[in-house]
Amino acid sequence: MKVHVLPQGDTFEVDTSCSLLEGAERAGWRWPSACRNGTCRSCLCRLVAGEIRYTLEWPGVSAEEKAQGWILPCVARAQSELTIEQPAARKLPPALSLLWSDDDLLVLDKPSGLLAVPGKGPDKQDCLSRRVTDTYPEALVVHRLDQGTSGLMLMARNPEAQKKLGHAFEHRQVDKVYLARVQGVLPASSDWQTIDLPILLDWPHRPRHIIDPSGRPSQTLWRCLQSDPQSQSSLLALRPLTGRTHQLRVHLRAFGHPIWGDALYAPEAVQARSNRLLLHAWRLTLPHPRHGTSQQWEAAPPPGLNPGNVSVV
């Protein structure tokens, strides 16, 4: 049976042999819930259209609540196509994508929208590092990506590898190449240019950062791979030489070419050009923590960020 979820506007399929809550979670939804027997009522949602039946003779919903359309999806099964309303429900990002593993490190492709590490609050505990440690309990964080940024992220599998990888990042032994779709038409070029602007936390408006003379030195190399006059946009390759928070986003905004879909730094019209931040950690090259041999990985670019046959060296 199809279940339509409001106000998100998404749909999932549920088998009539399982509860709505089980079907939602199998389809990759995170639902506010703490039990499976109807006693906690934290999963309560409103039935807008369709028919259900309860697996309990006396589910924990009052007559008044029933009249208003409230149901308990943990003990309800679909009898027809449904439309339900649950603002707190959210579709989880794609499952774990592991590109490489050995005794010392894991190379992952983080989806846009998924936190790299846990944040503050119960709604910010689902993240890449926790998904990884569910399968690899020994995995250790080495670096992070912004929630909206997709692409390559490394985790170490032992403390010695974590130490060596951290040293490599700190001493600029890691070559990182990002792809970004930005507003404005720039001339395509094989030459790298530099943005050298200090970045400071905008404390009254945190987590935003700003360009400020008292900020930390920050350098980004960039080159335009493609431009599209029709959409008034350009595809850039970016090499951050320093690792400041939001560095690429802040530098490109200051440069006059904000990233499409950037809810923090782009004007509303540029935010609206994409339903996600079009910034992707595309390529990583670094010395392997055990034997020191240079290794390189790439994460396939999402739509809108594919450089095609353009060489990036």
Image (spheres, rainbow, N blue to C red):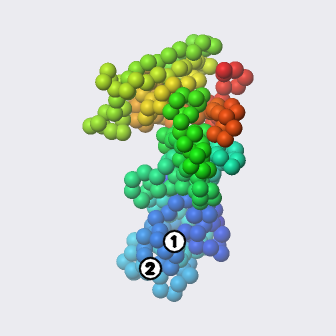
Query: 30 or 108: nearer the eye?
Result: 108
- Asked if the residue at tag 1 contacts the one at tag 2, i.e. Cβ–Cβ closer than 8 Å, the answer is no
Q: Measuring from the top left, give residue 71's x and y in whole percent.
A: 47, 73
What residue is rendered at 56% in x and 34% in y?
Answer: 168
Residue 104, percent from left and from top: 65, 47
Which secondary structure, mark 1? helix
Q: Residue 42, can we see it?
A: yes
Which residue is at the far bottom? 57
Rendered-image quadrant of the N terminus? bottom right
Q: Residue at x 57, y 15 (%)?
A: 192
- Say if 34 sits above or below 165 in the image: below
Q: Quadrant of residue 289?
A: top right
Tell which residue pokes out farthest to the right in this image.
309
Of residues 273 and 122, the one nearer the viewer is: 122
- Residue at the far left: name it: 204
Residue carrying label 2 = 39
Residue 279, how many percent across, how many down? 54, 33
User: In what quadrant of the picture does the C terminus appear?
Assistant: top right
Query: On the rendered structure, is 112 left or right of 198?
Result: right
Q: Which residue carries the number 1 mark?
A: 73
* Mark 2 vs mark 1, CA separation in Å: 12 Å
Rendered location of residue 193, percent (x, y)? 53, 14
* Residue 173 to residue 189: above or below: below
Give the amino acid at mark 1.
Pro
Q: Marks 2 and 1: which is nearer the front?
A: 2
Q: Could you say which is closer to the camera, residue 194 or residue 142? A: 142
Q: In the displayed structure, would residue 205 be above or below residue 89?
A: above
Q: Is residue 254 left or right of residue 235?
A: left
For label 2, the SS is loop
Closest to the observer: 287 or 41?
Answer: 287
